[in-house]
């Protein structure tokens, strides 16, 4: 479990407005993710991030007041990337087969970006109040995105869209995270298996109701 702290984490000092500033932010976040994955949270420093990103420590502090704010920004970028993939998977303007392929390819791509850092973010790095709030918002947005994706792509009906979408989310995320841990994200066999899994789940016929004796469990997200 990731370390939790009670103080509010430092928020990003200012949002980049120009293309050059956005490029600087991306370089800093890439460097932060690289160092986090390579060295872990205990050896993570803002000086090391600035050096790896090729910027001065003063430039880094213009945007991030401390390393906790920097880690929060890495998390938020990952959240935004995941949500963008899910939205593409529900896009009605492209054929269903391409939507499913885009979903799988996007999830693999997102988690191929600094996979070691993702583990550290989940298991080692601390979370302040700002980070917890961002995570809560992401969980809600992710749940809704999976529900929209399920509705857009499922060929069978279900009154329990939320639960069905949760099963799909758990299966896909679990498989991708395990593949990341095993170093298998670049495998074409993995991609084929994931496309097959998602397509089979969304294509199978579903009951539109449950019997009175069957209780649907509460969903925890």
Image (cartoon, helix red, strand yellow):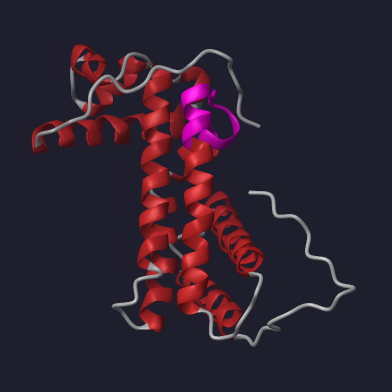
Q: Is residue 35 left or right of residue 27?
A: right
* In the image, residue 33 above or below residue 95: above
Return the residue nearer the eye: 53 or 22. Answer: 22
- Asked whether residue 125 is in view, the answer is yes
| Residue located at (78% from left, 65% from top) | 216
| Residue 58 on the magenta segment | no
Residue 35 image-quadrant placement: top left
* In the image, residue 161 above or below residue 64: below
Give coordinates of residue 39: x percent, y percent.
47, 27
| Residue located at (40% from left, 82% from top) | 96
* In the image, residue 38 above or below residue 206: above
Give coordinates of residue 156: x percent, y percent.
59, 85
Give coordinates of residue 104: x percent, y percent.
45, 67
* In the image, residue 99 above or below residue 20: below
Q: Is residue 109 left or right of residue 14?
A: right
Return the residue nearer the eye: 136 or 183. Answer: 136
Q: Read off the magenta span.
A: 120-134
Residue 109 image-quadrant placement: bottom left
| Residue 132 on the magenta segment | yes
Marker count (numbered): 0
What type of secondary structure mainly makes up the magenta span?
helix
Q: Is residue 161 left or right of residue 38?
A: right
**Residue located farthest toward the right when viewing the structure as drawn:** 213
Position of the N terminus, as image quadrant, is top right
- Asked whether residue 189 is in view, the answer is no
Give coordinates of residue 210: x percent, y percent.
78, 77
Residue 34 image-quadrant placement: top left
| Residue located at (45% from left, 75% from top) | 152
| Residue located at (46% from left, 59% from top) | 145
């Amino acid at each position: 479990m990731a370390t939790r702290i009670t103080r509010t984490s430092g928020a990003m000092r200012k949002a980049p407005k120009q293309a050059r500033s956005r490029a600087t932010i991306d370089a800093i976040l890439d460097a932060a993710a690289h160092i986090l994955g390579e060295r872990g949270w205990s050896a993570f420093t803002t000086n090391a991030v600035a050096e790896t990103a090729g910027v001065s420590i003063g430039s880094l502090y213009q945007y991030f007041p401390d390393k906790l704010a920097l880690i929060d920004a890495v998390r938020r970028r990952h959240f935004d990337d995941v949500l963008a993939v899910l939205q593409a998977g529900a896009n009605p303007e492209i054929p269903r087969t391409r939507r499913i392929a885009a979903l799988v390819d996007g999830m693999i791509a997102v988690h191929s970006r600094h996979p070691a850092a993702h583990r550290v973010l989940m298991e080692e790095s601390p979370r302040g109040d700002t980070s917890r709030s961002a995570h809560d918002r992401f969980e809600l947005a992710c749940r809704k995105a999976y529900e929209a994706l399920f509705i857009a792509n499922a060929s069978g009906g279900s009154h329990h869209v939320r639960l069905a979408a949760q099963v799909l989310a758990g299966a896909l995320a679990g498989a991708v995270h395990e593949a990341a841990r095993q170093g298998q994200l670049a495998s074409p066999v993995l991609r084929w298996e994931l496309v097959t899994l998602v397509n089979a789940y969304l294509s199978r016929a579903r009951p539109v109701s449950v019997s009175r004796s069957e209780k649907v469990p509460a969903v925890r997200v």
